[in-house]
Amino acid sequence: MKKIFLLLFASSTMLISCNDYLDVNTSTNNPNTNNIAPSAFLASALSTTYRTQAVAMNEYGSVMTNSWAGNVNAFTGGYRTEFTLNFNTNTRSGIWDNLYTGMFNYNNILVYSDPSNEYGNYKAIARIMKSFYMQYIVDLYGNAPYKEASLGLANLRPKYDDDKDIYKDLLLQLDKARTDIAASTASLIPAGNEDIVFRGDMTEWVAFANTLELKILLRMSQSTEVDVVSLRTSRIAALSGKPFLTTDAAINPGYNGESTQGQNPLYQNWGANKDGSSAGTNRNFTVASQYIAKVLMGTESNTHVNSTGILDPRRTRMFAALATGIVGINQGDVTLVAGGTAPAAASRLGGGVTGYLGVDATDRYNNGSGKDGYIMLASESYFLQSEASFRYPSFGGNAKTLFQSGISASFDHYNAPVGTYTFPTLIVAAPYITATNSVLGLGWDGTPNKLEAIMTQKWLAVTGINGIEPFLDQVRTGFPANPFAITAPAGAVKPKRLLYPASEYTANSANVPNVVLSQIFVVNQFTPFWVN
């Protein structure tokens, strides 16, 4: 944990050039930043945590749910760790390290001395976002530092808190945030341009907090523990009729192509250079998996999904089409010359994901570099509501209608203009919803297990954008029931968590639990409490 508090995390300040309001003279990781007004670095705090979500978390989830594969025609051994399930303490360690760094920034806002409550809205936003990312720490690691975390030099070796207790407190933090927003008055300093998500619209922040609470409660849906069931039951009912996110929670501090550091982080990692080349980027490394390509192209038929004859209109937004359509590589396959069956060319990430759209290379570069990021999509919100409506009558709503609204919201997302680019033809959700309604895995009426339909369509809607969510759904419910890589060991099961990072065993060895590889695949005292 020492690394978290003493290391100057570059992404906290790398976006300073985007807008003047990101200009912070003191690092947001400095122990003295509780003397800096929250308005001075709210934008930097938001962009720091989003970078981890957009890159490391998104990539991990998209690979683990068989959406992305490595381009074996240009690289050897891509995603081998994930395909073989041979994890170690360095696997995705940046998720832990960088999320804690980001949450330290939110904590600086929360502890800022504000006796007149001028910065109530800023603190409410920080409280919501710290809860948002702390949930992911619990989901991916289980027990973790919480009460003693984010104290900087005051405590370099924080103790670990019980993950269930953390979850319970996250709900209380959301209560506090909503109470503070409701109590705000016109005299309070508004969270305006410094709020790079909702631009000071606190009504949207309340809807986001409600949606986050619903996600937290649904993550506990499989638990039979008496206290969890009681908590879940009462709070699900209390959410009935409350406003939820209906538009994408976009984030943009002023992303641009003036430097690679100032770009949208997803584009920085998977976009092209200004001249259209792929050198120095992952653009040529990450391609569609064969499985998702077949689902989108209407050629997949298995015991869980039958997309036969149904072309998904979103396919060319999600991945770049080749002459024969979307072409993917079977995870774990190798090239023909190496004895495998991988095609000679595969589809890269599409313009709807990276923003690489426009009339020429420069235009595409600028549009992609400046593209909005997305903390949560409206489609995810609708699928969460659909699941809650299906599972819990007290929540209310029509589960099928909400399910179809989730699909429609996904189409809306992929129709939105990107920078100066407007799609010449819009994709329409209604015919797709009608065509898939009776189809196994893709449609409500055609799928006996409604949870499978929800999770499969949710996977298609958010993969590559917030790819960690379908993976956590998979751990929780078993859906989407996508295949393993062909190099996975016999009898493979999905990991229930990640190993604690090497940085913890180095700097916080007295407190970090000793978890070994074999333990992350079975339910035990080290897996998140909500995993059955």
Image (cartoon, rainbow, N blue to C red):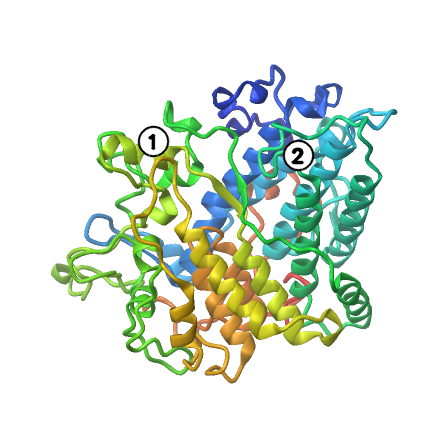
* Quadrant that contains the N terminus: top right
Q: Which residue is drawn at 46% across and 83% down?
A: 446
User: Tag 2's secondary structure?
Assistant: loop
Total numbered badges shown on the rendered structure: 2
Question: Residue 424: x and y, percent?
Answer: 29, 48
Establish if 13 lies above or below 160: above
Q: Which residue is drawn at 73% across and 41% down?
A: 127
Question: Residue 333: x and y, percent?
Answer: 25, 63
Q: Left or right: where does residue 271 sit relative to residue 453?
A: left
Q: Is residue 151 visible?
A: no
The answer to whether the residue labelled 2 contacts the one labelled 1, judged by CB atoms less than 8 Å apart, is no
Q: Left or right: where does residue 452 sit relative to residue 322?
A: right
Most distant residue in the left direction: 337
Q: Which residue is drawn at 39% across and 55% down?
A: 81
Kindly identify the amino acid type of the residue bearing the numbered disc 1: Asn
Most distant residue in the top direction: 25
Question: Residue 92: x and y, percent?
Answer: 48, 47
Of labels 2 and 1, the one closer to you: 2
**Label 2 environment density (alpha carbons within 10 Å; few <14, some 14–19, many ≥20):** some
Determine the image quadrant of residue 225: bottom right
Of callouts 2 and 1, the N-terminal one: 2
User: Tag 1's secondary structure?
Assistant: helix
* Quadrant that contains the C terminus: bottom right
Q: Is residue 361 visible?
A: yes
Establish if 60 lies above or below 1: below
Kindly identify the amino acid type of the residue bearing the numbered disc 2: Gly
Name the residue carrying label 1: 366
Q: Which residue is drawn at 52% across and 58% down?
A: 379
Question: Residue 170: x and y, percent?
Answer: 75, 51
Give the Cα distance between marks 2 and 1: 26 Å
Establish if 422 lies above or below 253: below
Name the residue carrying label 2: 200
